[in-house]
Image (tube, rainbow, N blue to C red):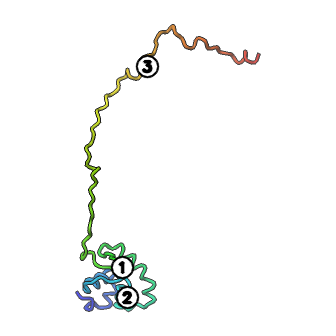
Amino acid sequence: MKLKDIPKDELELMGYDDIAYLILEESNKKMKITDLFHKICDLLGLTEKDFENQIADFFGMLTTDKKFIMLENGYWDLRTRHSEKFVVEEDDEEYEDVIEEEPVEEETDESYYDEDRDDDPDDDDLKDIVIIDEDEENM
């Protein structure tokens, strides 16, 4: 359906994004955001004051709507008319051979004991310790 065939009362029920889509589709060319929104304002009979008050909201709406794409120099167009270029750079370092680590052996309970430990019960390291009673200390 052509924009000129849509009655004004129906246009007023449409969102700005829908009207912008129809304008870009019919014109088959990219447009600056100000020109696009001026066309919308003209179709809806909005004033220049309305344009000034709502252009920022219109810009925000276009940037979040996936149907539109912002091009160089402030032009907007329908995303379907543009293909996105993806540059894939291969990093040679990613493909280096992975060095496999040797499996770690599980430790046994014996590994926690000190092998140099002397279990001689007669060898008492605490034999020279002197315990002083509090009462003796004050004397």
How crowded pointer 1 is (Cα within 10 Å; few <14, some 14-19, many 20+) is rated as few
- Of tags 2 and 1, the one toward the viewer is 1
Q: Report how far apart the C-alphas of labels 1 and 3 lie in the structure.
A: 76 Å
- Of tags 2 and 3, the one toward the viewer is 3
Secondary structure of the residue carrying tag 2 is: helix
Residue 78, image x, y percentages: 28, 78
- Above or below for 126 versus 104: above
Q: In the image, what residue occupies the spot 31% across and 28% down? A: 105
N-term-proximal mark, 2 vs 1:
2
User: Residue under circle 2?
Assistant: 38
**Given the image, on which type of amino acid does mark 2 rest?**
His
Q: Report how far apart the C-alphas of labels 2 and 1 lie in the structure.
A: 18 Å
User: Residue under circle 3?
Assistant: 114
User: Residue under circle 1?
Assistant: 73
Q: Number of marks in the image?
A: 3
**Given the image, on which type of amino acid does mark 3 rest?**
Asp
Q: In the image, what residue occupies the spot 37% across and 88% down? A: 38
**Given the image, on which type of amino acid does mark 1 rest?**
Asn
Asked if disc 2 and disc 3 are in contact, CB closer than 8 Å, the reply is no
Nearest to the observer: residue 40 or residue 128: 128
Nearest to the observer: residue 105 or residue 1: 105
Picture quarter containing residue 62?
A: bottom left
Name the quarter where the N terminus is drawn. bottom left
Q: Residue furthest top?
A: 122
Q: Residue furthest front?
A: 92
Q: Residue furthest left?
A: 1
Q: In the image, what residue occupies the spot 28% across and 33% down? A: 102
Residue 37, image x, y percentages: 37, 85
N-term-proximal mark, 1 vs 3:
1
Name the quarter where the C terminus is drawn. top right
Secondary structure of the residue carrying tag 1 is: helix
